């Protein structure tokens, strides 16, 4: 958790940087594995916001993947499947361009 907090502390105010998003994503992943799903989800949402601002579609895809895993873990299987299908569709479209 210290690593993620350090990323955030050093980069939270950098404009156009993906590092705040990476910090929030890393923190969310660590919280997920500690079964702290509520805080993990909050960090995923923060990461998604920063990736959206920086227009990093693959970063958002990664965040969505972890949101899908979390939803599956808390028995929201239909929502989880929806997230994974959206990610798959995104990748198929990108591959065919």
Image: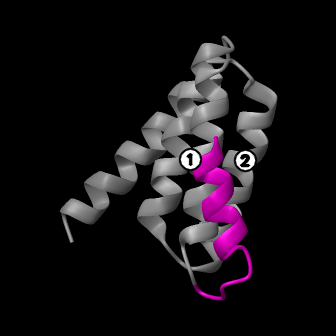
Image location of residue 68, percent across then percent down = 55, 32
Q: Residue at x 53, y 58 (%)?
A: 60
Is 52 left or right of 97, judged from the image as shown?
right
Labelled disc at residue 26: 1
Q: Is residue 16 visible?
A: yes
* Residue 78 forms part of the magenta stretch: no
Magenta residues, dominant SS class: helix
**Quarter placement of the C terminus:** bottom left
Secondary structure category for the residue under label 2: helix
Residue 12 placed where, x, y %? 72, 73
Taking the spot 38% from the left edge, 55% from the top edge, the residue there is: 90
**Residue at 74% across / 81% down in the picture?**
13
Q: Is residue 82 left or right of residue 38?
A: left
**Rendering quarter of residue 53:** bottom right
**Which residue is drawn at the image coordinates 68% and 63% (left, top)?**
8
Q: Pointer 2: what residue?
A: 43
């Amino acid at each position: 958790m210290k690593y993620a907090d350090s990323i955030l502390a050093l980069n939270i105010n950098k404009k156009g940087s993906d590092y705040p998003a990476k910090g929030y994503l890393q923190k969310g992943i660590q919280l997920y594995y500690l079964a702290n799903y509520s805080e993990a989800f909050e960090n995923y949402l923060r990461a998604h916001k920063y990736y959206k601002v920086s227009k990093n579609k693959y970063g958002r895809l990664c965040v969505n993947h972890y949101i899908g895993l979390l939803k599956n873990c808390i028995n929201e299987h239909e929502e989880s499947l929806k997230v994974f299908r959206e990610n798959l569709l995104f990748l198929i479209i990108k591959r065919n361009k």
